[in-house]
Amino acid sequence: MANSSSISAFLLLAFADTRELQLLHFTLFLGIYLAALLGNGLILTAVACHHRLHTPMYFFLLNLALLDLGCISTTLPKAMANALWDTRAISYQGCAAQVFLFVFLMSAEYSLLTVMAYDRYVAICKPLHYGSLVGSRACAQMAAAAWGSGFLNAVLHTATTFSLPLCQGNAVDQFFCEIPQILKLSCSDAYLREVGALVFTLSLVFGCFIYIVLSYVQIFRAVLRMPSSQGQHKAFSTCLPHLAVVSLFVSTAMVAYLKPPSISSPSLDLVVAVLYSVLPPAVNPLIYSMRNLELKDALWKLMTRCVSEAVNFHSTSADD
């Protein structure tokens, strides 16, 4: 029986038992990670460099890309390193840092998606008041509130979780340190403190979810009343990517945390965790760029400029 004061490291769940499969998983996740870095990095660069994209919607998209980069960088690099070096260990401090960053970034992202729903609601349902309700100062305040709420939520849950006495060993049944898996290692009734904090957070999550749903009910009613099909198409092109991102985020999280315990198993938990922690950050840039002509145009100009500069640099080097 282990005591939390004597635990210096945790053992994470391995992706595979054989060396060949471990290297295969490393290669697969390296490709996903690089794709996420490239996609979110391109969105960050495009929004920052193109003045046409200096609007509230793209300001929030820039924040979303930052959060996605942070979220996937919190979990995947350590899992890839463990697969590459054939180890399962993560230090106690590293586990606590991983829990803090993951809760911080996921909470901030959910808050930001709620703010983005408000932005789309005002843009479509109250367009005449958009400039006053969603000005630059209001945008900065709402983004700061999203990041700040994520930080406070992470402090609450990390402090509560790692203050619990751990009596069930140090083997975490997940490929990264996750609060539900840490709670399984705690002593009999000690985890009830963290359960109380989780109930409080879930009530806020449910409130945000209801707000997003009600916002989109109003948005769709307003869009369907538009007289021109062109106006409807433009409105849908700005709303559907956000709705798709929210649906992906909420559905994968619900499958992860609300699935019946009777169907739970380490392998299924591993697959579900990959779906909600790795898939959204990798897919979100693709979702936002598919139907958004402004963003696609900015990305195309950015890539064209990079290619031309690379060609010019190569030609200059060859002449020298």
Image: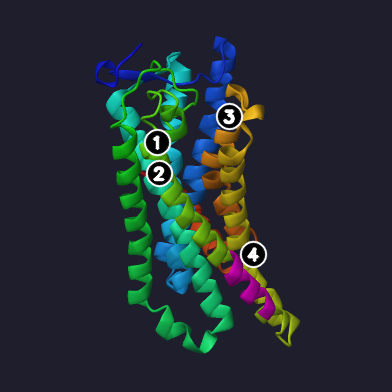
Q: Residues within 10 Å of mark 3 (few under 14, many from 20)?
A: some
Q: State whether the magenta stretch is mostly helix, strand or loop.
A: helix
State the SS at label 1: helix
Q: Label 2 amino acid?
A: Gly
User: Comparing marks 2 and 3, which lies closer to the viewer?
Assistant: 2
The dot on residue 196 is: 2
At a point 50% along the width and 38% down the height, the residue shown is 34
**For the residues bearing labels 1 and 3, Cβ distance under 8 angstroms:** no
**For the residues bearing labels 2 and 4, Cβ distance under 8 angstroms:** no
Does label 2 or label 4 sit earlier along the sequence?
2
Does label 1 or label 4 sit earlier along the sequence?
1
The quadrant of the image that shows the N terminus is top left
Q: Residues within 10 Å of mark 1 (few under 14, many from 20)?
A: few
Tell me how far mark 2 sits from mark 3, CA to CA.
23 Å
Give percent across and percent down for residue 90.
Answer: 36, 22
Q: In this view of the protein, which residue sits in the foreground, 202 or 251?
A: 202
**For the residues bearing labels 4 and 3, Cβ distance under 8 angstroms:** no
Q: In this view of the protein, which residue sits in the foreground, 54 or 180?
A: 180
Relative to residue 201, is residue 122 drawn left or right?
Answer: right
Tell me the residue that label 3 is attached to: 269
User: Comparing marks 1 and 4, which lies closer to the viewer?
Assistant: 1
Tell me the residue that label 4 is attached to: 240
Q: Label 3 amino acid?
A: Asp
**For the residues bearing labels 2 and 1, Cβ distance under 8 angstroms:** yes
Tell me how far mark 1 sits from mark 3, CA to CA.
22 Å
Instruction: Mark yes or no: residue 34 visible.
Output: yes
User: Comparing marks 4 and 3, which lies closer to the viewer?
Assistant: 3
Tell me the residue that label 1 is attached to: 192
Q: Magenta region: which residues? A: 213-221
Tell me how far mark 1 sits from mark 4, CA to CA.
40 Å
